[in-house]
Amino acid sequence: MRSLPANLEPERLRAALASGWDLGSGSLEYIPEGGGAYHWQLTGRNGQRHFVTVDDLDGKDWIGATRSAVFAGLGRALGTAITLRIDAELEFVVAPIAAVDGEPLRRIDDQYAVSVFPFLPGRSFPFGPYANERLRIEALDLVAALHRATPVVRDRAPVHALGFAGRADLAAFLGEPDQPWVAGPFGEDARAALLAGRTAGLARLIAAFDQLAERTVASRANAVITHGEPHPANLRSSGGRLYLVDWDTAGLGPPERDLSLIAADSEDLDRYRRAADRDADPTVSKRDRLRWYLDDLASAVKMFRDEHRDTAETRRWHDALAPQLDRLPSWIELAG
């Protein structure tokens, strides 16, 4: 996130770090990066650095409907990453550091939870499609290794629920498209100028997604452990090695959940098939690419229907909404 959370009290964060990991002292520097959580670099008095992540339990409705359910599901996903790192010996998994109680996650207050990771020096990559072929192939090999590790975590990993974040908000908008959005500075412009004229197309695309989900339900019978978002921004190069970060989306699902973000052609799928000893279904990959698009649109609807401020984050989402909606006709054609 580009902006600090409005109602997170810094002293509560420090208290949670102290009680959970004995990391109460030292300097906290906010890192305005990422799209799903808030991040800090914690530097202790001894110079040791940690990467601190704070999750808003109201912002992950794809995990659960309540804060308690989100906290439990997020804990299972992060715990799965620890098991993959330690028991499956997948060194590319950047897993959280367990707190003193052995859990990967602690509550800060009712709304926020914190986890702590090793600080990994190096560089990350821009969000979006893979522009670097070598990086894409390396990522494909990491995902194949991850999927092969499924037996180690099958009994503890969460099961990914097929759907997209913010669906309830998108449905509410489609039910009342003329209802003004006045809870923040970008609401009415997003609704009236950008979204209101697209209701028929949005409804058609949701119906197409649901049909694809029904047609591909059999793909969920042979689930593997998936990362969920293995795009370039969740890769980090450090010390000549490639690492996969951000495991809050980890869960059992079809391999296409990961492959849809990496595999570019049949050669990639053949490479994956040889490495993982699994086939991939192009129809399932299409479904999962469509899910990503709907997720982005519905998340924007949720943001601008709800109370929001003029921040770097909300400005970035607002600026991206029009180009996203311009692609709606091509997504309808693809889904059909």
Image (cartoon, grey):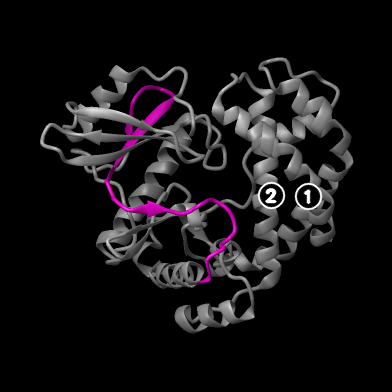
204 vs 150, nearest the viewer:
204
Q: Where is residue 9 drawn, in percent x and y?
A: 36, 17
User: Residue at 29% of width from left, 50% of height from top?
Assistant: 120
Element marked by disc 2: helix
Let me know if residue 53 appears in the view. yes
Q: Where is residue 94 drawn, in percent x and y?
A: 32, 54
204 vs 210, nearest the viewer:
204
**Is 71 inside the magenta-drawn segment?**
no
Q: Which residue is mark 1?
A: 327
Where is 270 relative to 335, above or below?
Answer: below
**Is 118 inside the magenta-drawn segment?**
yes
Magenta segment: 106-133
Let me know if residue 158 appears in the view. no
Residue 157 in the figure: left or right of residue 258: left
**Mark 1, other Cα within 10 Å: few <14 / some 14–19 / many ≥20:** few
Question: Are dots 2 and 1 in contact, CB under 8 Å?
Answer: yes
Which numbered dot is residue 293?
Answer: 2
User: Residue at 33% of width from left, 62% of height from top?
Assistant: 92
Residue 51 in the figure: left or right of residue 233: left
Q: Where is residue 37 drawn, in percent x and y?
A: 45, 36
Q: Nearer the viewer, mark 2 or mark 1?
A: 1
Where is 216 relative to 270, above or below?
Answer: above
Q: Where is residue 305 drawn, in percent x and y?
A: 69, 24
User: Residue at 56% of width from left, 37% of height from top?
Assistant: 61
Q: Amino acid at mark 1?
A: Arg
Q: Amino acid at mark 2?
A: Tyr
**Mark 2, other Cα within 10 Å: few <14 / some 14–19 / many ≥20:** some
